[in-house]
């Protein structure tokens, strides 16, 4: 068994925290570089680009059915199932029993 005095343990702990801090800052720097161009501006896809990718019927917006299809294509079937089931329930008008809910939230073609 290795015996360490308090001073040695303190130095070891400080070095451990220093190494952890340096590794986290390196990770943050690489993530920052990934999302920005050389001028420091965001260069990834815009929200408009993402919605256009989801908009399979090309009507200008992505409904919950298109969002679910896109997310499941990206992350696998069943991704965020509970949340998307709730959204679809609202879209079908099942979460609100008032007569106008179906015309507001539902799509009669689905």
Image (cartoon, helix red, strand yellow):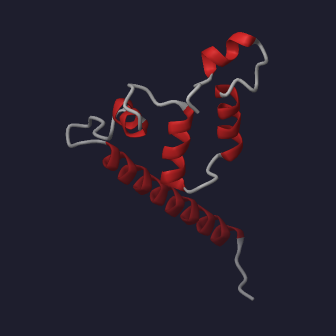
Q: Is residue 34 left or right of residue 56?
A: left
Q: Within the image, what quadrant is residue 83 found in?
A: top right
Q: How many numbered discs?
A: 0
Name the spot of residue 32 as percent of width and height, x first.
36, 46
Name the spot of residue 35 as percent of width and height, x first.
34, 44
Q: Within the image, what quadrant is residue 110 found in?
A: top right
Task: Name the residue: 56% across, 33% down.
Answer: 64
Q: Residue furthest left?
A: 39
Q: Quadrant of the N terminus?
A: bottom right
Task: Name the residue: 52% across, 45% down.
Answer: 69
Task: Name the residue: 48% across, 45% down.
Answer: 70
Q: Residue furthest bottom?
A: 1
Task: Name the residue: 67% across, 46% down.
Answer: 81
The one nearer the camera, 35 or 10, is 35
5 shown above or below 98: below
Q: Residue furthest front?
A: 109
Q: Is residue 45 left or right of residue 25?
A: left
Q: Is residue 97 left or right of residue 10?
A: right
45 shown above or below 12: above
Name the spot of residue 24 as percent of width and height, x first.
48, 55
55 shown above or below 6: above
């Amino acid at each position: 068994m290795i015996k360490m005095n308090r001073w040695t343990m303190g130095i070891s702990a400080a070095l451990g925290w220093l190494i952890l801090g340096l590794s986290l800052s390196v990770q943050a720097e690489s993530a920052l570089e990934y999302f920005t161009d050389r001028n420091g501006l965001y260069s990834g896809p815009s929200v408009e680009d993402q919605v256009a990718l989801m908009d399979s019927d090309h009507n200008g917006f992505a409904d919950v059915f298109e969002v679910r299809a896109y997310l499941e294509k990206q992350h696998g079937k069943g991704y965020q199932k509970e949340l998307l089931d709730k959204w679809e329930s609202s879209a079908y008008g099942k979460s609100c029993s008032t007569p106008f809910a179906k015309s507001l939230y539902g799509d009669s073609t689905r």
